[in-house]
Image: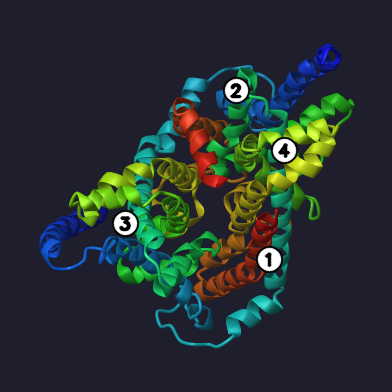
Amino acid sequence: MTTVTAFTPAHRRPLRWVQPLVVLIVAGVTIGIPLWLVAVTSFKPQAEAIKPNLSLPHHVQAAANYKQSFDEGKIVQGFVNSLLVVAPSVVLVLLLGAGAAWVFARRKGRLVNTLYALSISGLLLPPAVITIVMELRQLGLAGTRPGMIGVYAGMYLSTSIFFMTGFIRALPEELEEAARMDGAGPVRVFFRIILPLLRPVIATATIMVMLYAWSDIFYAFFVLGGGDKATLPLNLYQVANAQLYLNNWHLIFAYVVMMSLPMVLVFVIAQRRIVSGITSGAVK
Amino acid sequence: MVDTATMDAIDATRAKDRAQDDGQERKSRRTRPRSKANQPWWFALPALAVFGVFFLLPNLLNFVYPFTDWSAFHSQIGFVGLSNFSTILHDGSMARDIRITLEYAVLVAVFQNGFGLALALLLERDTRFNRFFRAVFFLPVLISALAVGYIFRALLAQDGALNSVLSSLAGHHVDTPWLGSTTWTLVVVTLIHGWKWMGLAMLIYLAGLKSMPGDVLEAARIDGAGWWRTFWSVRFPLLAPAVTFNVTTALIGSMNTFDIVQATTGGGPGSETEVFNIYMFRIFGQGLYAQASAMSLVLFLIVVVLAVPVIVGLRRRENNQ
């Protein structure tokens, strides 16, 4: 025992500074350099930014860049537009998903199994984006927020139903039984017992849907297009393509900084819950 | 604003159902056994309706429209048989996009998981320092994929940041076309994709490492197993659920990739990074809707034929542990 305790620190001491050193180098090269490039370029005038490099700006014009891309990129409008499609999508995915998951988790029979398998097929199958456009046109929802919300909700319902059904199956049914004994109807049981118990999965699902839908551009292109309903990523695409040959890096990166800050801020504030939310849902 | 209307409608039906339920509850307390409708079907109906209308129906229509001449150029839609498929078959785009998308998916799965696992092992111990750097490596996950693409386009451009750093290191002019090679650019783009999502894979591997039973690791240590031996024989097999989750999400995510490719190469050079979604976007933009949906159907079939067995296999391996 004494040999072990004497041996361990001597053996471990070199490792103790090797690990932080490796972490610092890896983080510096893989994360530091790209973020540094974004930051310095967004401070440069166009002439300096046209060939993006890591050197400090000779002439700092941060305020002008940020203001210009704020105005041209319609940051506020884009933010509101993003919020108006992503937030309702998340709410729909969670609320409708929880209702379906409760039925799928508790009821038995072939019909339940078939519908469950169908509902989680979206985990694997790709959304048929081209025919979505056709269908939305016929429904009169093309280029509208309800259309976009429906498409996002349809895409992510499978994920939330899958996670929530697994979670509810692991919950003891006695809690619901007890409530029913006390005379609570299904609506009451669902809102008072099931939904509060689902809180950890709700966190996971919210984060996952936010991560994908907030930065989505592909489906937004097809459903919303440009115009006055464009979301933040669509606006970034328009800023970047406003000039031929992408020579407005100073504006692009000013936009990237402004558009990423809300997500980073949310993460910094709710870091612990987000991390535990992602991991508790995924590895079960 | 229709969404709030539908929400109101849902609320209204809820309220009505609640009223009805209460009525039934009162009645059933006297007459029926109450096990009847503990979880009534209508709880599942809104989800099934939304999923059916916005996901299943388009996928069903996707088996119809590829056989028509639906396009921006005429208002009538008529059936034309297999001509869209013969077009994409004969111009080589179908075979090329299948090959590129599959290469892309496999490379992303390898990079994303390799980086994620390496970071998880590097930052495994729960110290303040490690917790901070876990957050740092998670930053790319929070940045939108399109923005990530632009960042690397600036970094890897021929007169961009990386080449100027390499030039000053090497002492002579370096102008490697990182995004201009018909062979290697696909690898570069998948590395970027792996970079963007490695933080998420890292978190999931960290959770897997943390949930490992202590007595098994203790037993391995007592048996004199070193770090590598413990890792390969004990810890890695126990990570199977995390591997399944990460490989699955990487494969599915990268088969539907668009943003990073569009922002870095736009499908080039010479269409050598043209994945399915880039093709659909381009052809749809040209107004050839039916042809785009033919490619969409090919993607659907590829995913069904290839991804499903992979995932079933991974899950089976996991259950055998």
Name the disc covering residue B178, or none: none
Q: Residue at x 24, y 48 (%)?
A: A179
Front-most of residues A74 and A217:
A217
- Check disc 2 and report the residue beneath it: B132
- Check disc 4 and report the residue beneath it: B216
Disc 4 vs disc 1: Cβ atoms closer than 8 Å?
no
* Element on which disc 3 rests: helix
Cα distance, mark 3 to mark 4? 52 Å
Q: Residue at x 27, y 49 (%)?
A: A178
| Disc 3 and disc 4 on one polypeptide chain | no
Q: Amino acid at mark 4?
A: Val
Q: Earlier in the sequence, mark 2 or mark 1?
A: 1
Residue B185 location (% of width, % of height): 76, 50
Q: Amino acid at mark 3?
A: Pro
Dot 1 falls on which chain? B
Q: Nearer the viewer, mark 4 or mark 1?
A: 4
Cα distance, mark 4 to mark 1? 46 Å
Q: Amino acid at mark 2?
A: Phe
B6 up-or-down from A87: above or below: below
- Check disc 3 and report the residue beneath it: A146
Q: Earlier in the sequence, mark 4 or mark 1?
A: 1
Q: Is residue B160 visible?
A: no
Cα distance, mark 4 to mark 2? 29 Å
